[in-house]
Amino acid sequence: MVVTVHGVAQLIYSAICSLDLYINDTSGSFAWAAPDEQVHRFVNEQERSVGTHLFGRGMYDVLKVWDTFGSDPEAPEVVREFASIWATADKVVYSASLEAVETRRTRLERQFDPAAARSMADAADRDVSVGGATLGATALRAGVVDRVDLYLNPVVVGGGTPALPDDVRLDLELLDTERFDHGVVYLRYAIRQP
């Protein structure tokens, strides 16, 4: 097997999850996933390479606060920094029910087309990120993702929304790891293509 490199940019699926690989718990809470300053700073560095974010409705609803959140000069530097990164990135939201998007540099698409997402990444000079477990699962099943980045939190929640789909096999190559003071571990994997 070889690691496929399509172009300059990569299509990346990234998730902050529990050790048992859920993005939220059975009640839908993900409060346990809030990054501390050290992890937040690292996330900011990773997000700098992303030129376009692809979101499902749920992830967009969570993240759209960043269009104004963090703009207060009194906000912590790491928060202001992420707000700036968010503001300069393009965003595509896939939803059949959302009537309009509320954030800058954002367009609405009714249906996710994996081939179009792959083409977008192939034509881009900056990475394209897939956000949200449902959209990520669709992209992973379609075989269009180049890389999987996971932030494992030191908590087992016992159920919720899985970060990775059950019905897909991925052969991975570990590219990088990072361990943080409060127990979060970052894992970066390339997806090997036959």
Image (cartoon, helix red, strand yellow):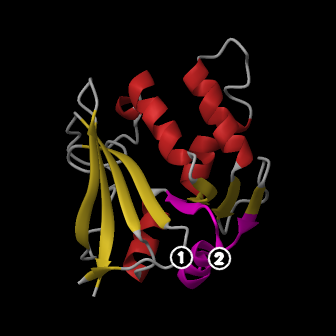
Q: Which residue is farthest front? A: 8
In this orientation, does residue 53 appear? yes
Question: In the rendering, at what x and y percent does residue 147 appear?
Answer: 39, 65
Along the viewing direction, whichever of 84 and 26 lies nearer the viewer:
84
Question: In the rendering, at what x and y percent does residue 33 appear?
Answer: 38, 34
Count of residue discs:
2
Task: Please report contact status of discs 2 and 1: CB closer than 8 Å, yes or no.
Answer: yes
Asked if residue 2 lies left or right of residue 146, the reply is left
Along the viewing direction, whichever of 182 and 55 lies nearer the viewer:
182
Q: Which mark is residue 131?
A: none
> Mark 2 and mark 1: span between their CA atoms?
7 Å
Q: Which structural element holds mark 1? A: loop
Residue flagged by tag 1: what amino acid is it? Gly
Q: Which structural element holds mark 2? A: helix
Residue 115 covered by magenta stretch: yes
Asked if residue 56 lies left or right of residue 185, the reply is right
Question: In the rendering, at what x and y percent does residue 185 appear?
Answer: 26, 39
Residue flagged by tag 2: what amino acid is it? Ala
Residue at image mark 1 = 7
State which region is magenta.
108-131
Residue drawn at the location 24% of the way across and 76% of the way down = 169
Residue drawn at the location 48% of the way across and 56% of the way down = 132
In this orientation, does residue 36 appear? no
Residue at image mark 2 = 123
Asked if residue 138 lies left or right of residue 93, the reply is left
Residue 54 covered by magenta stretch: no
Along the viewing direction, whichever of 168 and 99 lies nearer the viewer:
168
Placement of the C terminus among the 4 image quadrants: bottom left
Vertical side of 41 occupied by 5: above or below: below
Q: Which residue is farthest bottom? A: 194
